[in-house]
Amino acid sequence: MARIVAACATTHSPGLGGWIEHEDEAKRTCVLAGLEILRDRLLATRPDLIIGISTDHMLTSPPYNMPDFAIGVAERHAGPAPGIDLWLRIKPFAIDGHRPLARLLVNEAVKLGVNFVPHEKVDFDDNFSVPLSYLNPGMRIAFIPVLVNSFVPPQPSPQKCYQAALALKTVIETKWTGAERIAIVATGGLSHEPGGPRNFDVDEAFDRWFLQLLAEGVAHERILRECSLERMNQAGEGGTAELLAWMMAMAFSQGPAEILAYEATHVWRCGSGLVWWPSLARVAPRAAGAVV
Amino acid sequence: MSIMDHFDKTSPLHRMVFEVRKSWALRARWKNDFDALAREYGLSEEEKRAARACDLPGLHALGVHPFYFNPIIRLTHGEDWDEFQPITVEIMKRSYGEAGDPRTYERS
């Protein structure tokens, strides 16, 4: 039986690729140290597969046809997309997917009432290229990209995202017969407002408030309620809601998260945070049945 | 300013930016053959002007999603930091005043 062996979340700031050297040295050092810790912990769990959860920056699906959730079902993925590689200064790479499991996730989630649109091709930008370049040396660990609509109104609520993640967890634990060790890596956030009046701002107070909720192990229901779309938009519209991906990772965890790093990295144009959940959620009963 | 103020999902600029970002050939045309490309995507004169000038308030009023503002700036001026950063600062300051100036947020 497949096992979830890790749950974590990290920023995917494009600045960590394309303009890393322009950020304040102390902030840069702190975030890079956090990424090193995260990479070491992730690799220590010996994952066969990473399921990455992140936002679609309107690159895979357009703003006029954006699904709430999507999954890349290809046997092999490639990134970054043309031109995006110049922006991120990340050399084009390829990485194995996991088509059988990705397809099962799409099809079994339907039976649990959740629609994940299958994509034969997911266009990677900073969402996956940046974290993978730090956390998956040599791109040796296979990867399934999961996309959530953080940008295009009406976005799914935090509660809906959490339930969608629970559906993924249930399918993995009750329907998949493989023996993979699976790591969940959410990417995005924290506060930022790309393109808006606060393009260069970071809401550090919001970021620290959100991270504190995770660090205190506050009940998930409360986090989902208090960190609403409205609250996230107040902290930076059109960017902060990338934390929906973190809330999906939360569904695989229990108890407090450990904050590995946080800095208000204005030059990178977002708050940069990383967390690791030491305790994982209990395994779902091995029986069919709706969880959502 | 909120995304929801004017957001127009049917704006032809959304399809244009979405497709141009992913194609080397269309990226080259955005830089060198913009008017013809814009005509093919059915942009109005006002949409053409706002996109060409990176007029963010204008694009916002025309219903373009603000997330596409930075990609529009980079398609026009270049993807490298040295190409896009100085002009982005200038455009943000012009568009949003003090709020758009990164110096407003400089802290010790």
Image (tube, rainbow, N blue to C red):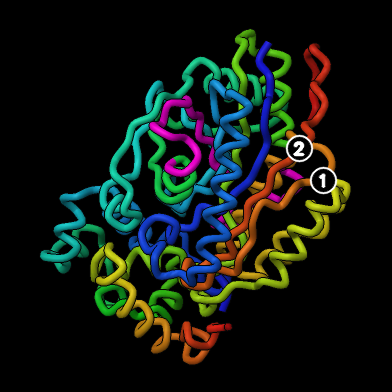
State if disc 1 and disc 2 touch (CB < 8 Å): yes
The C terminus of chain B lies in which quarter of the figure? bottom right
**Callout 1: residue from which chain?**
A
In the rendered image, residue A17, in percent from the top left (x then y), is placed at 39, 55
- Residue A267 lies left or right of residue A40; in this view the side is left
Per the rendered image, the range of residues in magenta is: A133-162
Residue at the image point whose x is 68% and y is 13% from the top: A175
Residue A154 visible? The answer is: no
Q: Name the residue under label 1.
A: A256
A152 in magenta: yes
Residue at the image point whose x is 19% and y is 62% from the top: B30
Crowd rating for badge 2 (residues with CA inside 10 Å; few <14, some 14–19, many 20+)? some
Q: Amino acid under label 1?
A: Pro
**Callout 2: residue from which chain?**
A
Question: Who comes first in sequence, dot 2 or dot 1?
Answer: 1
Asked if residue A266 is positioned above or below residue B24 in the image, the reply reads below
Along the line of sight, the residue nearer the viewer: A258 or A53: A258
**Circle 2 SS class:** loop
Label 2 and label 1: CA atoms lie apart by 8 Å
In the rendered image, residue A96, in percent from the top left (x then y), is placed at 41, 24
Q: Amino acid under label 2?
A: Pro
Query: Share a chain, discs 2 and 1?
Result: yes
